[in-house]
Image: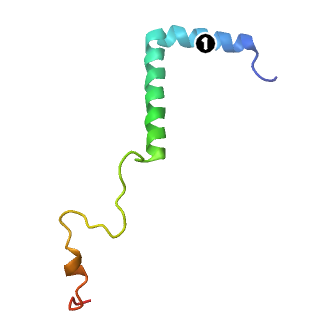
């Protein structure tokens, strides 16, 4: 008993190639690569998009004059 030798792995590889075929394995590997790239992009975040700064008004928001009035009920 012990680990697999190189011959065991070669036999497993041949069986996998016979069962799935090379076309199906290459398309699966390509899909896996795309998924990894999308995951990396998601982890890195949206660095290319500008981030809103504090104190800047967004379009459609109340103006600074309306927000800073003292007579606004809190």
The spot of residue 46 in percent (x, y) is 40, 47
Which residue position is annotated with label 1? 13
Looking at the picture, tell me which residue is in the foreground, 27 or 53: 53
- The image shows residue 35, relative to residue 73, as above or below, that is above
Q: Is residue 26 above or below residue 32?
A: above
Q: Quarter-wise, where is residue 30 in the image?
A: top left
Q: Residues within 10 Å of mark 1 (few under 14, many from 20)?
A: few
For the residue labelled by badge 1, is the local secondary structure a helix, a strand or a loop?
helix
> As rendered, which of 43 and 71 lies closer to the eye?
71
Q: Is residue 54 left or right of residue 44?
A: left
Residue 74 percent location from the top left of the image: 27, 89
Residue 28: where, in percent of width, then height? Answer: 45, 21
Q: Residue at x 34, y 60 (%)?
A: 52
The structure residue drawn at horizontal position 48% and vertical position 13%, both measured from the top left corner, is 20
In the rendered image, the vertical position of residue 28 relative to residue 37, given as above or below: above
Q: Residue furthest right?
A: 1
**Position in image of residue 15 (x %, y %):** 58, 10
């Amino acid at each position: 008993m012990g680990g697999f030798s190189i011959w065991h792995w070669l036999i497993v590889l041949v069986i996998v190639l016979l069962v799935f075929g090379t076309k199906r394995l290459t398309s699966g590997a390509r899909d896996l690569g795309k998924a990894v790239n999308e995951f990396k992009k998601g982890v890195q975040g949206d660095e290319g998009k500008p981030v809103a700064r504090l104190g800047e008004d967004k379009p459609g928001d109340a103006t600074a004059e309306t927000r800073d009035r003292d007579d606004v009920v809190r």
